[in-house]
């Protein structure tokens, strides 16, 4: 009897280490109704399913236990919905409309989507420059003057975006948002590269951030590629400033 009670006590202690997440979602997008949604995350350098559910009459729900807070993305089957969210203890609210997507209800998700709102505002300002250019041409303004005015504004917006992203990652380098947003800004790059922004982030971020598996692998690959580029003897790649596809692939595969 004492052994049974002892084992129950151990199990209770183990259970208390895991916390629950609860994602309550709603959608007005008819395409999602009846579809299967997945929460997916990068684990061991692979995209893996964390949880799944079905959308019924515009409602969906994910629930489960969580050993550690993690950043995941929402998918419809294999199609990404471009909706990152943080699986953390508490009641997470997801809202999907035709014109907006929002996650709220828990501290890190509130922080993430406040950042994304600010980032979207900067993207909208940059897109608006194209509309203004067309209008200025219709108004008969000289093309060189248009280019001068809009290039100054575009540079200012780019600086604001750089500052916003850099500061957010550095301030959140001790939680999942830092590596998560770092992955978001680097995933679209043609190959891993060490931009001034990334170098600044690495110089300011925490050791926990630098030890993150994605960050660590990215920085290693980018450093190796940069070293190879600087040591290239071939005139053609040096002239373009970029290594060839085969060179990049060999570096990533550890063959260079």
Image (cartoon, rainbow, N blue to C red):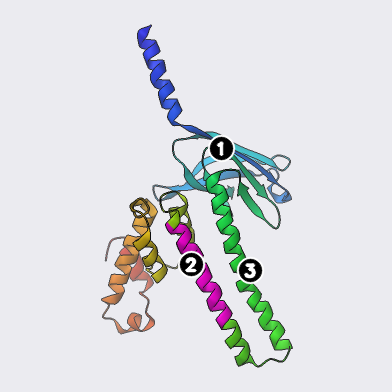
What residue would you read off at disc 2? 163
* Alpha carbon distance from label 3 to label 2: 17 Å
The tag earlier along the polypeptide, 3 or 2, is 3
Residue 90, numbered circle: 1
Q: 17 above or below 37?
A: above
Mark 3 vs mark 2: give the one in front: 2
Residue 124, numbered circle: 3
Dividing the picture into quarters, in which one does residue 198 lie?
bottom left
Q: Position of residue 45 (x, y in %)?
A: 40, 51
The tag earlier along the polypeptide, 2 or 1, is 1
Which residue is drawn at the image coordinates 66% and 44% (left, top)? 35
Of 222 and 92, the residue lying toward us: 92
Q: Give the range drawn in magenta.
A: 152-170
Location of the N terminus (image quadrant): top left
Judged from this view, the residue extending furthest toward the top is 1
Q: Does the magenta stretch include residue 167?
A: yes
Q: What element carries label 2?
A: helix
Q: Where is residue 87 in the image (x, y as percent from the top left)?
A: 52, 42
Which residue is drawn at the image coordinates 64% and 78% (left, top)? 130
Of 110 and 181, the residue lying toward us: 110
Q: Is residue 198 magenta?
A: no
Mark 2 vs mark 1: give the one in front: 2
Q: Position of residue 208 (x, y in %)?
A: 35, 50
Left or right of residue 85: residue 129 = right
């Amino acid at each position: 009897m004492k052994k049974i009670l002892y084992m129950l006590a151990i199990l209770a202690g183990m259970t208390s280490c895991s916390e629950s997440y609860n994602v309550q979602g709603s959608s007005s997008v008819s395409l999602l109704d009846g579809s299967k949604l997945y929460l997916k995350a990068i684990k061991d350098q692979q995209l893996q399913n964390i949880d799944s559910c079905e959308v019924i009459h515009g409602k969906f729900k994910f629930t489960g236990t969580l050993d550690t807070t993690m950043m995941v993305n929402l998918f419809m089957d294999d199609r990404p919905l471009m909706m990152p969210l943080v699986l953390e203890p508490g009641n997470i609210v997801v809202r999907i409309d035709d014109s907006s997507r929002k996650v709220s209800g828990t501290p890190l998700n509130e922080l993430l989507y406040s950042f994304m709102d600010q980032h979207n505002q900067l993207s909208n300002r940059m897109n608006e420059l194209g509309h203004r250019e067309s209008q200025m041409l219709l108004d008969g303004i000289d093309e060189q003057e248009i280019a001068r005015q809009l290039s100054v504004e575009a540079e200012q917006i780019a600086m604001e975006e750089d500052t916003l992203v850099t500061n957010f990652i550095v301030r959140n380098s001790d939680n999942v948002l830092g590596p998560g947003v770092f992955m978001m800004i680097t995933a679209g790059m043609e190959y891993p590269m060490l931009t001034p922004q990334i170098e600044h982030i690495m110089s300011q971020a925490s050791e926990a951030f630098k030890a993150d598996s994605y960050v660590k692998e990215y920085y290693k690959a980018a450093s190796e590629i940069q070293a190879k580029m600087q040591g290239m003897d071939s005139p053609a790649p040096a002239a373009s400033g970029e290594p060839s596809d085969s060179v990049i692939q060999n570096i990533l595969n550890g063959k260079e």
